[in-house]
Image (tube, rainbow, N blue to C red):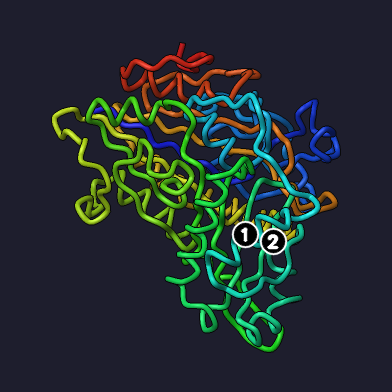
């Protein structure tokens, strides 16, 4: 039974793309390298064995010879630097036109339609902001009025923040569904609507990660995930994968509240210990096919530390992931391919709290495949081509397998 375990460490970029300045990012942005430098080195013994330090100079992570995994760097060919764009390209879908952003806030007519259709009476905010900062700023007024907090960022996102004791989760989610429909009905071209529930009181508020939900636009074309599903294969999404692809090409899905939960679920999936019937969302699975993808997004690096300019916390999150790599690797067989990569950058050491336009590292491991230097890859879609070859599932995309 052929399997792929694809782990995306959200925002762990490894150096600015040449066009980063066009996205408002300094060419000095380099999430992984700068986080390591800030922390006077990172303790990543298992990433080191795989060959992470062979990609570039990372303080505390030396190159090894020979590494366990093939190693390289991938450029993003799509226009953009957001989660949806990065993940879609990993699955083989390259976007020529970026999603639209709203640096001045959303148009009056959009907000008015949202207010009318949700019957929320009014909104607070409607400007780009840090998610933690805006709930501290407007949380008290939100609790007093019940008006949702609307905000965006340098990414293409329509975010709705509500206190769980003021606006129940089911209403927040319904408002997000209404916002998604409004955006889809018009030419606003917004990538994601994000539900941002929070808790706390008296100006001291905290977002509830486990209750976050993303309402994305569905993929605009076929991905490697669709090809696998159509062949009867199984695609288990762990974390926000289900939301990113709007269930397209996902057969099983489970949300997570932390990286720790995601890592433990990944190990359970590899050991065939997940209750698949309870998380099944597609009827196309054919157990006789025997092919499977375990597709994981570990979001804490981005959501808790990258966007909050916390390089110390970012470093600890990577070290936590590293500590689970031995059990992940020991759960693999000769029929398994482990791919570890990222979807964009979010350098917490540079000004701003938004994603950064970066290339990403890639590590590919199988116990029987000799490691090699994969060099610089021209697109994230090489991951899709690699999965296609490993699982022997035909899929055409503008990319090259990293196994050849």
> Which quadrant holds residue 366?
top left
Question: Where is residue 217 shown, x and y percent of the image?
Answer: 51, 42
Asked if one can make out residue 73 in the rendered structure from this viewpoint, the answer is no
Label 2 element class: strand
> Which quadrant holds residue 317?
bottom right
Q: Are marks 1 and 2 in contact (CB under 8 Å)?
A: yes
Please, is residue 129 above or below residue 42 in the view?
Answer: below
Please, is residue 38 above or below residue 378 in the view?
Answer: below
> Which quadrant holds residue 139?
bottom right
Q: Residue at x 51, y 54 (%)?
A: 214
> On the picture, is 277 further left or further right than 75?
left
Asked if one can make out residue 375 in the rendered structure from this viewpoint, the answer is yes
Nearer to me, 100 or 132: 100
Please, is residue 69 above or below residue 279 in the view?
Answer: above
Residue 159 badge: 1
Q: Which residue is mark 2?
A: 151
Mark 2, Cα crowd under 10 Å, few <14 / some 14-19 / many 20+, is: many
Number of marks: 2
């Amino acid at each position: 039974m052929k399997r792929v375990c694809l782990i995306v460490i959200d925002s762990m970029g490894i150096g600015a793309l040449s066009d980063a300045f066009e996205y408002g990012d300094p060419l000095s942005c380099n999430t992984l390298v700068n986080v390591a430098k800030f922390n006077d080195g990172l303790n990543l013994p298992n990433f080191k064995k795989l060959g992470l330090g062979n990609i570039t100079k990372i303080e505390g992570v030396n190159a090894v010879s020979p590494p366990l995994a093939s190693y390289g760097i991938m450029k993003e060919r799509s226009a953009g630097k957001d989660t949806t764009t990065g993940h879609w390209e990993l699955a083989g879908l390259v976007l020529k036109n970026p999603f639209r952003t709203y640096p001045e806030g959303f148009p009056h007519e959009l907000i008015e339609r949202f207010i009318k259709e949700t019957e929320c009476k009014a909104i607070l905010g409607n400007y780009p902001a840090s998610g933690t900062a805006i709930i501290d700023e407007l949380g008290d007024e939100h609790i007093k009025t019940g008006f949702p907090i609307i905000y965006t960022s340098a990414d293409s996102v329509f975010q709705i923040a509500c206190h769980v004791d003021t606006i129940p989760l089911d209403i927040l989610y319904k408002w997000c569904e209404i916002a998604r429909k409004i955006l889809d009905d018009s030419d606003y071209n917004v990538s994601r609507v994000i539900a941002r529930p929070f808790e706390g009181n008296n100006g001291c508020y905290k977002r509830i990660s486990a209750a976050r939900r993303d309402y994305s636009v569905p993929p605009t074309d076929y991905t490697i995930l669709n090809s696998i599903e159509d062949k009867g294969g199984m695609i288990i999404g762990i974390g926000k994968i289900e939301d990113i692809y709007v269930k397209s090409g996902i057969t099983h899905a489970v949300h997570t509240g932390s990286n720790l939960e995601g890592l433990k679920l990944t190990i359970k999936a590899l050991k065939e210990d997940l209750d698949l019937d309870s998380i099944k969302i597609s009827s196309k699975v054919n157990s006789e096919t025997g092919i499977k993808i375990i597709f994981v997004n570990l979001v804490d690096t981005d959501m808790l530390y990258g966007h909050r300019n916390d390089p110390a916390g970012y470093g600890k999150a990577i070290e936590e992931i590293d500590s689970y790599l031995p059990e992940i690797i020991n759960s693999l067989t000769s029929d398994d391919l482990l791919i570890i990569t990222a979807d964009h950058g979010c350098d917490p050491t540079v000004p701003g709290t938004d994603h950064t336009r970066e290339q990403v590292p890639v590590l590919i491991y199988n116990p029987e495949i000799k490691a090699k230097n994969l060099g610089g890859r021209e697109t994230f879609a090489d991951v899709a081509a690699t999965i296609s070859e490993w699982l022997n599932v035909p899929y055409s995309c503008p990319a090259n397998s990293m196994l050849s």
